[in-house]
Image: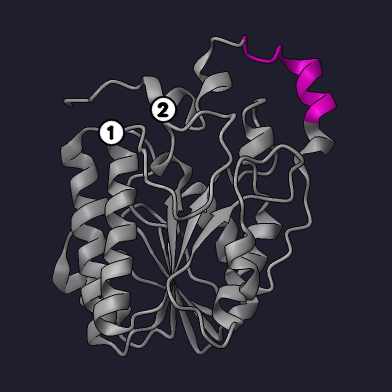
C-alpha cells in the first residue's frame, strides 16, 4: 500500500501496531484525539475526533487501507461510547464509501459474545451476547461492516479481539490471548488476500484452551504461532486461578459481565 491509516494510534495497541505495521505501506497515517508524539519520516500525524464527520472524511482521503482501533475500548457511559464507537463508526464507513472503499480491519471484541459461558465453543455465526454497552457498540460496528459490504461491496475483516497484550494478565486470558506478532500477521493477511469479503475472525493465538472456532477464516492463510500455555506456570506462581463461581471462570467476557450501566 501507499498509505495505511491507523486510528486509535495513541492507545496501547495502537502504539504497538504503529511500529509493527510499518512494512505494510510507504506512509502510515496515524490518528487519535490523544497525543501521538512526533511523526517519523514515514508517518503522518492527523489528530481527529471520530465523532466529527467532516474531519473523518478528510482523514480517510488518500488511504489505501484502514486499521480501525479507535474509539472507547472499555466499559463507559453511553454518551462516551456513542461518539467514538457508534457515530465514529458511521463516519468512518461513510468516509470509506466516499474515498474508493479502502479495505478495513475493524477491531471488534470478544465482549460482543461475553455472556456465553466458558464451556461453550463458538463459531462466528452464533448470535451475539454482549456483556455491556461497550460490547453493544462493537455489535453495532459489526452490523455496519455487514451493511456496507452487502449494500456497497465494502470489504472489512471484523476481528473479535480477545486479549491482545504482550502476555496474558490472568488465567481467563489463557483462552483469549493474542500475541502482538499474531495480530500483526493477521492484519497483513487481511490486506494481502485477493478477496476479503466481510468475515468475522476470532482474534486469538493458537492457545490450547480457546473457546472459538476460526476454521471459517482459514481462507486468509493466517496461522497464529503463539500459545498462551507458555505463560501458565508464571501465572500460577503469581496468582491463584479464580474460583469456579467467579465471573472470570464462568463467562467468556469475564468481569465485563459485572459492570454496571455507567451514568457519568
Give x and y (percent) for residue 106: 42, 63
Give x and y (percent) for residue 23: 65, 78
Q: Secondary structure at mark 1?
A: loop
The residue at the point 56 percent across, 34 percent down is: 120
242 in relation to 264, above or below: above
The residue at the point 38 percent across, 46 percent down is: 127
263 in relation to 186, above or below: above
Task: Name the residue beneath numbered marker 1.
Answer: 76
126 with respect to 144 (left or right): right
Q: Could you tell which of marks 2 and 1 lies nearer the N-terminus? A: 1
Give x and y (percent) for residue 94: 21, 75
Q: Secondary structure at mark 2?
A: helix
Nearer the observer, disc 2 or disc 1?
Answer: 2
The residue at the point 33 percent across, 33 percent down is: 75
Label 2, label 1: how far apart the Cα atoms are: 11 Å
Local packing at callout 1 (Cα closer than 10 Å; few below 14, some 14-19, many 20+) is some
230 with respect to 86 (left or right): right
The residue at the point 81 percent across, 36 percent down is: 229
> Magenta residues?
232-243
Local packing at callout 2 (Cα closer than 10 Å; few below 14, some 14-19, many 20+) is many
138 with respect to 197 (left or right): left
Task: Name the residue beneath numbered marker 2.
Answer: 256
In this orientation, does residue 25 appear? Answer: yes
Q: On the rendered image, what quadrant is the C terminus found in?
A: top left
Amino acid at each position: 500500500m501507499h498509505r495505511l491509516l491507523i486510528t486509535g494510534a495513541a492507545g496501547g495497541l495502537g502504539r504497538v501496531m504503529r511500529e509493527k505495521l510499518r512494512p505494510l505501506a510507504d506512509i502510515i497515517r496515524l490518528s487519535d484525539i490523544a497525543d501521538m508524539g512526533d511523526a517519523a519520516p514515514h508517518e503522518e500525524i492527523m489528530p481527529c475526533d471520530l465523532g466529527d464527520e467532516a474531519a473523518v472524511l478528510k482523514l480517510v482521503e488518500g488511504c489505501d487501507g484502514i486499521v480501525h482501533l479507535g474509539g472507547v475500548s472499555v466499559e463507559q457511559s453511553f454518551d462516551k461510547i456513542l461518539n467514538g464507537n457508534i457515530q465514529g463508526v458511521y463516519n468512518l464507513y461513510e468516509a470509506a464509501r466516499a474515498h474508493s472503499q479502502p479495505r478495513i480491519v475493524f477491531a471488534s471484541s470478544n465482549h460482543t459474545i461475553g455472556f456465553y459461558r466458558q464451556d461453550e465453543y463458538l463459531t462466528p455465526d452464533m448470535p451475539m451476547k454482549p456483556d455491556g454497552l461497550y460490547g453493544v457498540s462493537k455489535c453495532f460496528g459489526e452490523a455496519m461492516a455487514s451493511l456496507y459490504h452487502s449494500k456497497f461491496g465494502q470489504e472489512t475483516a471484523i476481528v473479535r479481539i480477545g486479549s491482545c497484550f504482550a502476555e496474558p494478565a490472568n488465567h481467563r486470558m489463557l483462552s483469549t490471548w493474542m500475541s502482538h506478532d499474531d495480530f500483526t500477521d493477521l492484519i497483513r493477511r487481511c490486506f494481502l488476500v485477493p478477496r476479503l469479503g466481510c468475515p468475522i475472525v476470532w482474534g486469538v493465538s493458537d492457545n490450547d484452551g480457546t473457546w472459538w472456532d476460526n476454521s471459517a477464516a482459514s481462507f486468509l492463510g493466517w496461522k497464529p504461532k503463539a500459545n498462551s500455555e507458555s505463560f501458565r506456570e508464571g501465572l500460577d506462581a503469581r496468582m491463584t486461578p479464580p474460583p469456579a463461581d467467579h465471573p472470570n471462570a464462568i463467562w467468556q467476557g469475564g468481569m465485563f459481565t459485572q459492570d454496571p450501566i455507567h451514568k457519568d
